[in-house]
Amino acid sequence: LLLHAGAGDRTQSLNEGEPAWHDALRAAVDRARGVLESGGTALDAAQAAVASMEDEADQFNAGRGSVLCADGSVEMSAAVMRGEDRAAGAVAGITTSRYPSQAARLVLDSPHVLLIAQPADTFAAAAGAEQCDPSYFATERQRARLGDHLAEVDGGTVGAVCLDTHGNLAAVTSTGGIRGQIPGRVGDTPVIGAGTWADAYAAVSCTGQGEAFIRVAVGHEIAALVRAGVPLAQATGEALSAVAQVGGRGGLIALDAAGNASLPFSTEVMPRAIWRAGGDTITLIGPAEAP
Ligand code: ASP
C-alpha cells in the first residue's frame, strides 16, 4: 500500500505541523490495513485510506479543508480505478458529497465513468452518499490562504495505490484542485489515464500541476511502459521527465503487479506512506529520507 498527500514546496505550515502529517498518513494506512485484514480488496483499502485523508481538515487538500477556488468556493474531484477489469469511476467539480472518493466509487459501480458538478452529487446522494452544505468544506485555514500569493503547486492532494493478496491493483485520488483556480477548472485527478490509473500491470496516483499530467497521460503512460517490459522505476522516471518537458512539476505513487513500488517527485516534498503486509508503516515527507 502506498499513499501520497500531494507534491509541493516545503511550506512553513508543513514545517510546523510535520508530526500531524505523519500521524494523519499513519491513520490512513491503519484504516486501509483494517480493510485488507478483514478481507477487503485493494480498491476497498485504497478508498478507505483516501476517505480517512478527506476527513482531515487541517492537512490535506481533499474533502473538508480543500483549497478554495478564486471565488471562495470549493470544487472537489476524485477518481477510483480497479486494475483487474479496468473498471473506473470519477467525479469532477462536486460541492456537497462528504467523501468525493466514495462518490467516484459509486460511479465505478454504475454504467458511467465520469460525472460532473451538481448532478454528480445528486447521483451520489441517491446512491446513499452523505451530503454536506458546501460551507462544510471551506475551512478558515484555506480562507486565509486564498489571500496569499498563489502557489505553483500547493500540495495536499491525496492518493492511494494498493496491491492485495489476490494480485489485484487499484488506484484512488482525491483533490480540491489548485488554490485560486477558476471555477470549472478540472485537473488531472479525475481524468482516467492521467492522474489516476490501474490495470493488470500498474496502479498510479498522481499529484502536481494537473494540466501537465493530463498532457502526458501519466498514469496510462507508466502502465503502457511497464506492459512493454520497462522496469517500474524507469517508467515513472520517464513519465515525470515528460511532465517536466511540458513545464510541470509534481509527483506520483506507483505499484506494479510484482509489488515493486516507485514514489518519485520533482517538488521539494511529497508526504507519503509505505506499508507492506507483515511490515511497519513508513511515513516520509522530503527526498533525503527516500527509501
Ligand atoms: N493535480 C491536482 C490538480 O491539478 C493538484 C495537486 O495535485 O496538487 O488539480
Image (tube, rainbow, N blue to C red):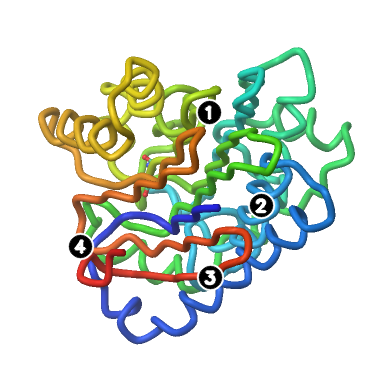
Distance of mark 1 from mark 3, alpha carbons?
A: 23 Å
Amino acid at circle 1: Ala
Question: Disc 2 marks which residue?
Answer: 134
Amino acid at circle 3: Thr
Distance of mark 1 from mark 2, alpha carbons?
A: 31 Å
**Which quadrant of the figure contains the C terminus?**
bottom left
Question: Disc 4 marks which residue?
Answer: 268
User: Which mark sits nearer the N-terminus, 2 or 4?
Assistant: 2
Question: Disc 3 marks which residue?
Answer: 281
Distance of mark 4 from mark 3, alpha carbons?
A: 22 Å
Depth check, mark 3 against mark 2: the one in front is: 3
Kindly indicate whether the residue at mark 2 contacts the one at mark 1 (C-beta within 8 angstroms). no
Q: Compared with residue 112, is residue 288 higher up or lower down, i.e. above or below?
A: below
Tell me if residue 75 can be seen: no
Distance of mark 3 from mark 2, alpha carbons?
A: 34 Å
Residue appearing at x 10%, y 30% in the figure:
245
Front residue of 285 and 279 = 279
Kindly indicate whether the residue at mark 2 contacts the one at mark 3 (C-beta within 8 angstroms). no
Depth check, mark 1 against mark 2: the one in front is: 1
Disc 1 within 8 angstroms of ligand 1 (CB): no
Front residue of 156 and 280 = 280
Amino acid at circle 2: Pro
Q: Secondary structure at mark 1?
A: strand
User: Which mark sits nearer the N-terminus, 4 or 1?
Assistant: 1
* Quadrant where ligand 1 appears: top left
Residue 165 lies left or right of residue 173; in this view the side is: right
Which mark is on residue 198? Answer: 1
Bin the neighbour count of mark 3 within 10 Å (Cα to Cα): few under 14, some 14-19, many 20 and up.
some
Distance of mark 4 from mark 1, alpha carbons?
A: 26 Å
